[in-house]
Amino acid sequence: MKKNLIYSILLTLLSLHTMAQVKISGKVTDAKDNSALPGVSIKIKGTQGGTQTDLNGNYTIQVTSVKPVLIFSYTGYASQEISTVGKTVVNVQLAGTSSALNEVVVIGYGTVKKSDLTGAVTGIKGDQLNDKPVANVTQALQGKIAGVEVSVNSTAPGAGAKVRIRGIGSINSNVDPLYVVDGVVGVDPNSINPLDIASAEVLKDASSTAIYGSRGANGVIMITTKRGRTGAATITYDDNFNVSELYRHLRTLNSAEFVKVYNESFANGQKFDPAGGVWAPPVALNHANFPKLFDANNNPIYDTNWEKETYKPAFSQSHQLNIQGGSEKSLYSLSLGYFNQNGLAPTSAFKRYTIKMTMDNDLKSWLKVGGSINLISSRQRLVTDGNGGLNVPRDVSEEVPIVPVKYPDGTWAGNYDIAGLEGAPNPVQVANERYTLNNNLQMLGNIYSLFHITKELDFKTDFGYNLSAQKNNFYSAGDLPHLSQDQGGVANVNAYNNYYWQTENYLTWNKKINERQRFTALLGISFQQQGYARVRSETQNFIDDIFQYHYEQAGSVRSANETQDEKSSLSSYYARLTYNLDEKYLFTATGRYDGSSRFGVNNKYAFFPSVGAAWRVSQENFLKDNHTITNMKLRASYGTSGNQEIGNYRSLAQIQPSTTVLGGAAQSTLLPSYIGNPNLKWERSVQFDAGLELGLFRDRVNLNLDYYNRTTKDLLLQAPIPWSAGETNANVYKNVGSVRNSGVEVSLNTLNVKTPDFEWSTNFIFTTNKNKVLKLNDNGADIFPGPNFLGQNFVIRVGEPIGSFYGMTRLGTYSTSAEDVAEAAKHSLKPGDRKYIYNPDGSNYYSIIGRAYPKWTGTFSSSFRYKAFDFSFDIRFVQGVNTAANFKHSVEDRQTLSNSLASVLNAWTPNNQNTYISQVRNYKFAQDSHFDTWWVEDGSFIRGQNFTLGYTLPQPVLKKLHANRFRIYASVQNAFIITKYTGYDPEVDTFNSSYGSNGSFSQNLDFFSNPRPRVWNLGLQVTF
């Protein structure tokens, strides 16, 4: 008995050992032509084990489980799962497929298979957009799509980015692309939670944008948010914690250097004083005059590093819960989001709460209804005025180091404590006592009904809405010199109620004529209206700072009380026809007829047509069975689209209410304010596009090439009129001029290695854009659009690109050579003054000295996976561009008023004459500053955009956790930047940094910007 038991145990162990050693072998071939498939991934289901086929398609694998199942997968082929129970040889034939070509792409008023596209449309999935934590979708798009240039110009918490598709095609109109979110047109993309996005499609050419007619000239970005899915409910949780830190520095003078330069500057005053007077500081910097700041030996007590005191590491976090589920007839989704971002500057922050619900129901076989609602509540605390006034970034550079943040008794310190200095409060005090709170409550969504009239004919009616209430509260405390001290504190409140609604009604006919031909026809009508009501109040001279904007009655001076409301409407009729012959020859024709209330009575309506065609060469018999060329498509398009984004009532003559004093009493008046133009009409962009799509080696290599040429005509321009016309606005909108954008876009995706344990893919995008002004006004005269900083900064000139910097050429400084002394004297200057090029008559010579938009941009990305680990990085290139360091005026040319950059240590002296920085001197005798080539620097850069390392728990562990996915990751954004620019960051705009404004003429103007941080992230992604 005992012996039998031992035999039984041994036999059981032997059988288990034998089962563990089962060897499966076989060959994997193409189901179409029986050719061998090398490199096919073969995995044992539920384990980490696997192998791949050799060059002849053969494989061998050891299986260990009781009921082993092998998973065969290969790029460009449908995967198969095969049970190997009782088998030792398993031969497999894989059927070819192209998932990329069968991918459904969202276009205007419908969807289409990628293989059927005739236009330049690029899609990106939500997980690709959200590979790094950002506040909004505009930031997420940076470096993702060829032809889409994204400039993150402000790093203030919650700030959006500028997005430009295929260059700048307008002068005085909004140049942002049109955003369509779940069919709702004109949504501010910065209000959307990026983690709610399922996909985004960018429509770039006329064939794809013409369906949006008068609003599609700058491109269209279609955003589709997550909705329900068939099956058991899926719960996904994403969270992220990150720390931002300052990693580039703008070095200013320390205390010893400041005192030395300060005293030298006054000593040099005698040289530059025409009267030859001897100058000294108003109050000497010593212990006798400033016992709080200097010790008994007249050495500074403090050596404050204002960067270090102001820009502190900031902690941020985000959390997202998403639930998706449904049955075959009813789908639902619910998401909850929380985003909390803190900035480097004290008290700067952005918070956003989101809740989104969707429902889609097949009520009948002929009726489907659904809708979505997205509630967004956000609060942004801004502590900087973006144009470089006495704000936090400027104060960081200008505050002198010899004063502390606070004195020992707790009172604030600042430049105002030293007579003669420009008395700015210190940046920490400004950040705490001067701020704007932007509060926004928004409801966005739609309701639709889809009627299946026949198997081929559908009718959809959709009502979309976007409602928001904004309340922007501002307060500046009563103890801030040169800001609000004289007013006794200032509070103002701006409240807006904004509304937008649209109704879209369209028929879609999908007709299969025969086995060779099919078409889709679309016919629709649209009505849209938007408007707002605004109330503004301002109060000054508060009895105490505690009241602020909460209780404006506490201020004794009512300085503003305003109300305003506006609205506009758009009615449209549109149609599209797509035709497919033999899955090889594709044709699209689109037209939209728009009528807008914004234009003159003589031009309220316009028609925007386009045509497109494509040839799927790879479907021809001579390429159909080619193993090298998997996909090849040639396409071309031509058409027009428009731009109506100029604001309301520009075609109408207007009057402006005002007040005056008559007989000692205030009287209401009406003033002519705007002359109007009844002939005002749309800008029209005419665009040609030619493209090549190429897939090689079973789509392991995918190449997209596009050439585009877009000419915008009838530019909407604010043309000046004589002041003698008697209008308070001495300009009128006219359609004058044209501009052309042309360029090449390249997108290359490769799957370099794919094995069961290791995978490596790369992505490279490259874009060039050449912008040229073709016509301006009737006589082609230069236009100076502003902003103006010590003169004109930009010029619009025929033959030159939009965004051309305009200024003087600095040659250096005048030396003590006889030639330089004589030359300087011609301009009433002396050795040590800045040296410029002048006209023959001695007047200042101005020319184009740089460009604000790059000649080319690119991004190189790569992703690696080794077993459960993944690693990816993005490196962005921006080349052939300039950035204007306007801040140099304040911190290089104004000694004795504030602190200076450390670069003034290289200023002109008798022993250092080969320099571009003039000799330091009392500001009373400062040489006039000019916007010049010393300020306009090389703004090209290479940025380490994002590096991510992740780990995903293996399947056996997930089963124990009852989870489908569990991934933890760490990443760093802005890991490094390689640039010659001397400011914080060459990608900047301190005048118009946000969505919704034409920043064509302020890009890369840097007058004290917020520094861009390096961000360290730790995140978690879990799916149940």
Image: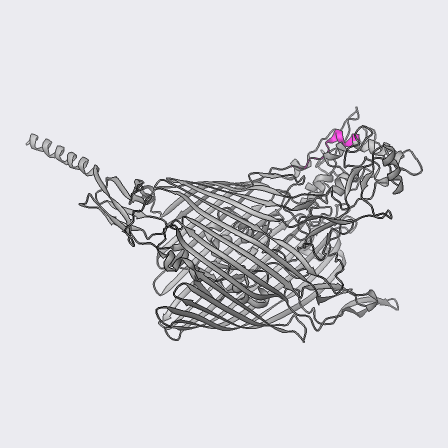
Q: Is residue 460 magenta?
A: no
Q: Please provide percent x and percent y for residue 688.
A: 56, 62
Front residue (pair 952, 407): 952
Task: Point out the residue furthest to the front here.
Answer: 622
Position of residue 310 in the picture relative to residue 727 (left or right): left
Indicate yes or no whether the magenta region holds residue 255.
yes
Q: Quadrant of residue 254?
A: top right
855 sits to left or right of 404: left
Residue lying furthest left: 1
The colour scheme used here is: one colour
Q: Residue at x 72, y 40 (%)?
A: 426
Q: Which one is in front, 577 or 724?
A: 577
- Indicate the quadrant where residue 185 lies: bottom right
Q: How many marks?
A: 0
**Magenta residue span:** 249-260
Rendered position, 286 above or below 367: above
Residue located 65% across and 56% down the image: 472
Residue 518 or 1008: which is nearer the viewer?
518
State left or right for residue 987 relative to residue 694: right
